[in-house]
Image: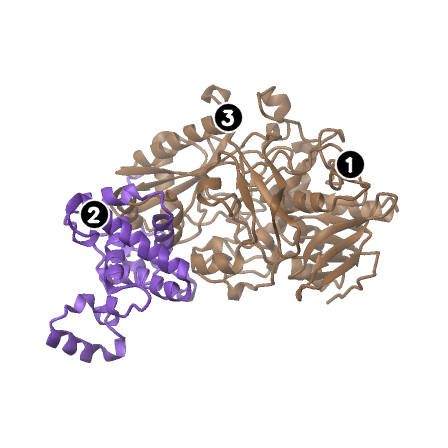
Chain colours: A brown, B purple
Amino acid sequence: MAKFDLNDSGVVVIVGSGAGGGTLGNELAQKGVKVVILEAGPRIENQDFVNDEWDSFAQLAWSDARTTSGTWRVARDFPNLPAWIVKAVGGSTVHWAGASLRFDEHEFKVKSTYGNIPGANLLDWPVTLAEMEPWYAKAENKMGVTRTNGIPGLPGNNNFKVLEAGAKKLGYKTVHTGNMAINSQPRDGRGSCQQIGFCFQGCKSGAKWSTLYTEIPKGEATGNLEVRPNSMVIKIEHDASGKVTGVVYADESGATQRQKARIVAVAGNSIESPRLLLNSASTMFPDGLANSSGQVSRNYMRHMTGSVYAVFEKSVHMYRGTTMAGIIRDEAANNPKRGFVGGYEMETLSIGLPFMAAFLNPGAWGRPFTSALDGYPRMAGMWLVGEDMPQETNRITLDPTVKDKFGLPVASVHFDDHPNDVAMRAHAYKQGAAVYDAVGATVTYPTPPYPSTHNLGTNRMSEKPRDGVVNKFGQTHDIKNLFVSDGSQFTSGAACNPTLTIVALAIRQADYIAGAMQKKEI
Amino acid sequence: MREVDRRSKHSRRVFLKGAATAVPVVAAATSVGVSIESAWADDASALSPATMKTLLKVARDIYPHDALGDSYYITAIKPWDGKAAKDPAIKALISDGIARLDQNARDRHKAPYAEVPWEADRVVLLKEIEQSDFFQKVRGDLVVSLYNQKEVWPRFGYEGSSAEHGGYINRGFADIDWLPKA
């Protein structure tokens, strides 16, 4: 396995090892580029994952201090946990559900399609679906997405069967077990899904794609990739010309190290990535790196989310099998007649009893609450995920008082729902309940958004430097050897789960970086 | 469909003073006329047995599940005694919180909280202190310490860890049999 010198200024340093960073690292390594991935969390292999929600949370979740503000309920119920993401090698691909959907054409052109929405900072992406299609195809093939590349769909579990029956009664047409990066048959050296459940706790069988046991070992096998776990990057440095020269990070022992670099790519998820750019402010860049537009950290999106759980007369045992076991796509289109722009997906979701108690209605107690939990074995559930409006005021700031153990300000996450998000959620709750009512639900529970899993948009792509942080390849407008490689590049959020698009963008970005390096442009 | 056996596999004995000495405790308790059910509270060192017993009542009233015996709630609240022993602030939080509840109960019902006979009346007393630090901490702890007990899970038809059993691929992941034909 490769081991690069701290003074090797020829390496590409990638901050983060998730869908963006892990994929970019492997893709570059395959092309012969030397890469050092600095991952803040430990390396935990899949045999060490635990089928226990709270134990797994303690093992994997990013629990470093963060603060919150805004009218979103998460700020009240979980003031120090704005996001539920992973701090470990593999990043949030360790705990993601596996849903791998392409954006719709209009979702790259939201400003042109939706027009002027008051309060929304809409912008068209500098790329189109047509331009992204070949990269989506590569991502689907890499990840082994079901219903692509001749890979059959997964079998539906009990939770899906309830959703499917209700959807059909209601007249929904596009209902299936999803496009999932979970093996329905052995592929790429990994076995097929054993219907363990606990997808959110790390897939012990490895059937679900995660950079932890796909991209990263493949990259390491080339001899061009070194992954350093427990390495928290605290600052990106630059020279007098404004080019970045490397990063300062705290290693496993807490000691400060400086890794030189030819290129730095930031992929620390949409809260840490802008925090790092802001914390890297210098005399030359007093507002943080790559922030001439003032858009770094703004337009934070987290998807319109919510869940509907329904209780039936007879057992469902929704927790058996894949967590996200199927989808209804009929509401994903843009149909402003519903009273909002954009669309949403309806995807099955199950959580175990411990998390159901914590998230069904945080803070609730007494008989209405315990009556709902008594229905647990007879419960079916779905997650509602839709496009939320980017707003300049939804943003990550550096907390004025709370500091991390390295003395740096922690991220403070401010979020208010846009009226469009509120209207969409109300519609989604109603339709979600209707699906279950159609097959005899005795009661349905609208469940508020969980701490954010889809964190997007805080270093957005734009054609013009004044509108955003990075260009169509994730290269910052201001600093040509500084890139952003995670979901913070997203100009808008689309209705669907973001991982496939993050991976497709990373594959494309690797192509661009390797080409630019060859041409000595960077 | 494969149903989950929801019968309690809990032995009440483990909640008496020290499981290993269960029999002598039963004998001693019987001989001095102390009820077996309250022996667990005498284990408390930092908090008084009366406080622990009231805390048990509070826990039941916060998350009432009629199919669960006291043993699960006792397991959930017992750690407060250890935390109180280590931290005077926690000791004060719990002792003062219970004292205030008892005072409110006496004012209203001429009886301490645990002896107010009806759940509906006790819930009103809890509602009054819902925003207090005491209530918030007790509830916030209980939502994990009660529902995260592996012994509780089968009572709610939840089976817990499945990987070591080969997942559910051959154990009923798709065995639902009552849905209307699509």
Task: State the residue at coordinates (69%, 33%).
Answer: A295
Q: Position of residue A433 (x, y in %)?
A: 35, 34
- The answer to whether marks 3 and 1 sit on the same chain is yes
| Quadrant, the C terminus of chain B | top left
- Count the labels in the image: 3
Relative horizontal placement of residue A485, taking residue B32 as reference (left or right): right
* Amino acid of disc 2: Ala
Most foreground residue, A279 or A439: A279
Residue count near mark 3 (Cα–Cα under 10 Å), binned few <14, some 14–19, many ≥20: many
Give the structural element (helix, strand or loop) at label 1: loop
- Label 3 belongs to which residue? A420
Residue B171 found in image quarter: bottom left
| Residue B175 drawn above or below residue A326 | below
Q: Nearer the viewer, residue B114 or A17?
A: B114
Residue at image mark 2 = B105
Q: The residue marked by circle 3 belongs to what chain?
A: A
Can the viewer see residue A463 in this picture? yes
Q: Amino acid at mark 3?
A: Asn
In this figure, which residue is indicated by the disc labeled 1?
A: A477
